[in-house]
Image (cartoon, rainbow, N blue to C red):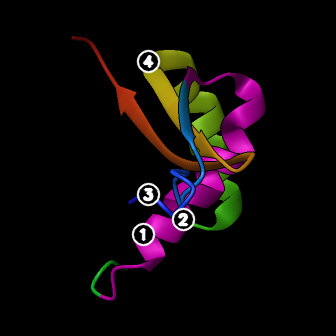
Amino acid sequence: MRGAAGMSNFPEVLLRAATASYAAAIAKTMRAALNAFDWMPVLHTPEEDFFFIRDIVLPNQQVTVAEAGGRIVGFIAVNGE
């Protein structure tokens, strides 16, 4: 949507390759997404989420983050093609 001045009402979303420095933000984003589903059981602690993203996902998958307003608002992790 565009406002009266032609500006978007939403911040611009930037996509960029994730680095290890994004691990905490990605883990928090993942936890927030999982918490949005009432039916999703909580199996791991936030610390375990962080270790999973840092030690398993980032080193072994191609991860892209979506950044808006200076914060990570989403991510995708792809393994292979």
* Quadrant hosting residue 48: bottom right
CA gap, disc 3 to disc 2?
31 Å
Q: Could you tell me which secondary element the residue under label 3 belongs to?
A: loop
Q: Earlier in the sequence, mark 1 or mark 3?
A: 3
User: Which residue is outermost to the left?
Assistant: 81
Amino acid under disc 1? Leu
**Which mark lies nearer to you, 1 or 3?**
3
Instruction: Write down the residue under mark 1.
Output: 34
Amino acid under disc 3? Arg
Residues marked 1 and 3 touching at CB (< 8 Å): no
Residue at image position (60%, 51%) is 11
Instruction: Write down the residue under mark 2.
Output: 31
Q: Earlier in the sequence, mark 4 or mark 2?
A: 2
Residues marked 2 and 1 touching at CB (< 8 Å): yes
- Examine the rendered structure and indicate whether residue 7 appears above or below residue 44: above
CA gap, disc 4 to disc 2?
20 Å
